[in-house]
Image (cartoon, rainbow, N blue to C red):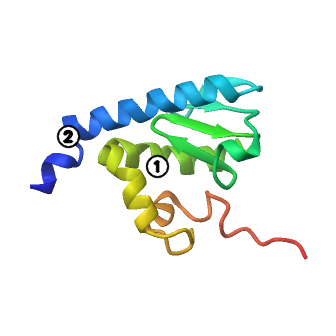
Amino acid sequence: MLRILFDSPLSRAGYLYATAVGLVWGGLLSTGRVERRGGLIVFRGLPNWAFGRGGSCVGGCYLTRDNVSDAILEHEAVHKRQWQRYGMLFPLFYRAAGSNPLTNRFEIEAGLDTGGYLTKRKS
């Protein structure tokens, strides 16, 4: 039964809807460069309140102020794939996985190191 929800026409529709939301959100709030990188549409220059942590992937869009290293975009490309697999169920699954990135299965799958979660902070 759940198979029809994952990697299906239904999840694809959810992914496309989320991408449309990301395009509108990024288009309205971005004051920086917009470009296509690594399969993502990257919106820069958003206000800090417009995304979570250092940036957020919404469908095929990545929304951030200026967090656009190659490693981060590699990490966010995995989140794009998660959106494609789970569609609009992805935000629910992500929230249920918890807010701690070190134990959140979706952040672990995307790569804690490439996501910047394992970088030592200077004291």
Residue 80 in the image: state x and y as whole percent. Answer: 45, 43
Residue 83: quarter of image: top left
User: Horizontal and vertical percent for residue 26?
Assistant: 62, 29
Report the residue at 77% width, 72% height from top: 120
- Pick the quarter of the image with the C terminus: bottom right
Q: Give the CA distance from mark 2 to mark 1.
A: 18 Å
Q: In this view, does 118 lie to the left or right of 19?
A: right
Give the answer, above or below, for where 82 lies relative to 106.
above
- Left or right position of 10 against 57: left
Q: Tag 1, which secondary structure?
A: helix
State the SS at label 2.
loop
| Badge 2 vs badge 1, beta-carbon distance below 8 Å | no
Residue 104 left/right relative to 7: right
Comparing 121 with 88, the one in front is 88
Which is nearer the eye, 119 or 44? 44
* Tag 2: amino acid: Ser
Indicate the position of residue 20 as horizontal and vertical percent values.
45, 27
Residue nearer the viewer, 93 or 81: 93
In the rendering, which numbered label is found on residue 8? Answer: 2
Q: Count the marks: how many?
A: 2
Q: Three-letter amino acid code at disc 1?
A: Val
Residue 7 located left or right of residue 51 = left
Q: Which label sits in the foreground, 2 or 1?
A: 2
Vertical comparison of 79 with 94: above or below: above
Q: Which mark is residue 78?
A: 1
